[in-house]
Amino acid sequence: MCGIAGFIGNRTEADLNRMLDAVRHRGPDDRGTYVKRERHGALVGLGQQRLSILDLSSAGHNPMPNSARNRWLVYNGETYNFREIRQELATKGHRFHSECDTEVILAANDEWGIRHLDRLNGMFAYAVWDETTDTLLLVRDRLGIKPLYYVETADGIAFGSEIKSLLTLPGVKAELDQEALHEYLTFLWVPDPKTAFRGIRKLPPGHYLTWNNGTLTIKQYWDIHFQEDFSRSQTYWEATLREQLRLAVERQLVSDVPLGAFLSGGVDSSSIVGLMTRRFERDGAGRTVQTYTMGSSAEDLAYDVNDDDTEYARQVGKLFHTDYHESLLQPDVINLLPKMVWHMDEPVADPAILTSYLICRAARETLTVMLSGMGADEVFAGYPRHLAAVRLAKLFNLVPQRMSEPLVALLPGAGTGTFGKVSRNVKKLAKSAGLPFDERYLGYGTYFTDAEKMALYAPELQAATVRMDAYHAHRTYLERVKGEHPVNQMLYLDFKTFLPCLNLTYSDKTSMAASVEVRVPFLDHTLVELSAQMPADLKLHGTTRKYILKKCLQDLLPKNILYRKKAGFSAPVRAWLRRDLREMVDDLLSETTLKRRGLFNPTEVRRLIEAQRQGREDNALKIYQLLTLELWLQTFVDKKQN
């Protein structure tokens, strides 16, 4: 895993080094640069900060040339099947001088051109400069596991693994994009291809970009196509999925450095740990899986939705005899939150970011690579909102709206204990339950509604956003799969938005902040393609989420792990807002600060805060959004302008 950066334009080698300085944390083991004039006079710069995972020798140094030395590549990621591709290329006369995947990608590009992408199994974002055609190629993996940002400038283009490297360049401004803000307040994050910065873009997953003498072209090379196969039995799907999951995990064990796994005690992480253990047992080398778990105190969890995972994680740790590491989530959140805002580049208001970073930081003491169960919920319909949108909404329709609305209104919006947690979920479910399917599912992922944003915005922002549709990208994706089963429609939307823009983004940024590589076997594209052939009812079966996954793992995991209540990966933000972050909220969201910023109505912000503190409404994530945004503005926009 690495950090890459580069440009074409009226730049200098010093510019390239500043870009790399900004992402040194992504690859502290080595730095390499390539700088050369192209035929039109622009300077081409490619750079990499390397975190050595495969072939730790200097033979893996980037930028790396092909055998003819007319193409140069900088690479971030891992290609798990590079040895198989290498063997095939060797039969075609290619010769190799390293044991790393970068050299194989160069040779594959030489042999097959852009179609080499079809052969890669992995997570990656890379750039190839072709000296013979003066063409820059940027590539992002199919599911968007690795990020890649770019910005067009007056005389060229610049790209990087993180936005902060782009902001080091003269002429690249740090300005808030108002449309992106409108979307951020809806979802907690900004959908691809926009970022919160005006003019800076994300290359979407499964796409590649070419740049030649000022002409930029973006094309899609992969997508998910649902083709449900009803001719197969459930037994067939269980056996096939079990084998494909085993292969996906074993492919991702390739490493020349120590690796381990996250362990929450849920079905996803537990299955990864179990399959890793079985592979290590077959190897006969006496290796045990190192696992890392983080729990929360009862005091912190009293106000939050999730239960403590540790009792389940301990059970799985004992079951598979792991080298078990457990710690309690007690961060210095006042100092950690601004740090993570810097690492995230964009405002991303999911408190799980802090938990993810702390686990990775703890693991870095012994490991460089971690396997994660992330992605299983998007592949097999594991989120409560999947069940709510398709099944539970029907329950609300049995009760006339004129009767249900007053009953739901009586429920508290916030509070402690099981009743407080349940009432919050019921109120959120009821708000969208009576809407058409598309709107219902979009509603479950909404934090500030359009009406709430209009009440929040200052007059100028109201006027600027009144005709904006925060759901435009989401509706476009839903339109592509309009005829598919509702479950598959939800999953497709998640694959295009929630998964890459939130979960994979924070997984990459928080792990790289600790110089750790995180791998996600459930997002092996062959496994995802297999799931797209499965009947949707095998994913969401009655009221059982991830049904087929749980069935195929019955010989690996006990029932109380397979069918435990989903806890989710998060952090106790409600407790933090009441205690640790209280003074920061009052300072950064004060009337004085808000008036100076000019985006929001101070009276409405204060109302949200007081309603949360008095238990009338659950505004925790809304307040956390606004707090994160102000920290982001101070960190990036104010700093760049001063």
Image (cartoon, rainbow, N blue to C red):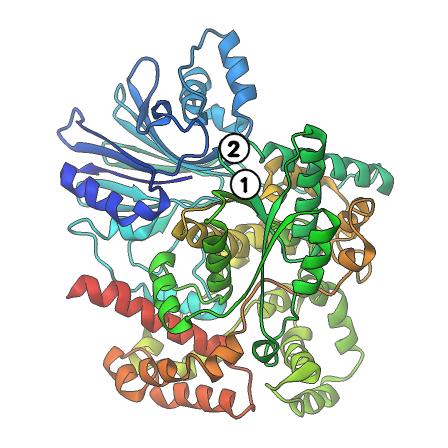
On screen, residue 12 above or below 181: above
Q: Quarter-wise, where is residue 384 in the image?
A: bottom right
Q: What is the C-alpha distance between the residues marked 2 and 1? A: 8 Å
Residue 11 in view of the camera = no
What amino acid is labelled 2 in the image?
A: Ser
Q: Nearer the viewer, residue 205 or 527?
A: 527
Q: Is residue 106 left or right of residue 638?
A: right
Expressed as whole percent of the image width and height from the top left, the position of residue 369 reads 50, 42
Q: Residue at x 63, y 36 (%)?
A: 287
338 with respect to 268 (left or right): left
Q: Is residue 103 above or below residue 591?
A: above
The local crowd at label 2, few if under 14, some if 14 to 19, many if 20 or more residues have their Cα within 10 Å, is some
- Say which of 265 and 225 sits in front: 265
Where the N terminus falls, by quadrant? top left
- Residue type beneath disc 1: Leu
Image spot of residue 55 (x, y percent): 43, 26
Secondary structure state at the residue bearing disc 2: loop
Question: In which image quadrant can residue 178 be found?
Answer: bottom left
Dot 1 surroundings within 10 Å: few (below 14), some, or many (20 or more)? many
Quadrant holding the C terminus: bottom left
| Residue 358 makes an appearance in the image | yes
Q: Residue at x 45, y 39 (%)?
A: 207
- The total number of labels drawn is 2
Q: Which residue is mark 2?
A: 255
Q: Nearer the viewer, residue 166 or 336?
A: 336
Residue 523 pos. (x, y %): 59, 43
Name the spot of residue 442 as percent of width and height, x first.
58, 65
Task: Determine whether label 2 and label 1 are within 8 Å by CB.
Answer: yes
> For numbered disc 1, what is the local secondary structure?
strand
Tag 1 residue: 259
Q: Residue at x 71, y 61 (%)?
A: 312
9 versus 559 height, above or below: above
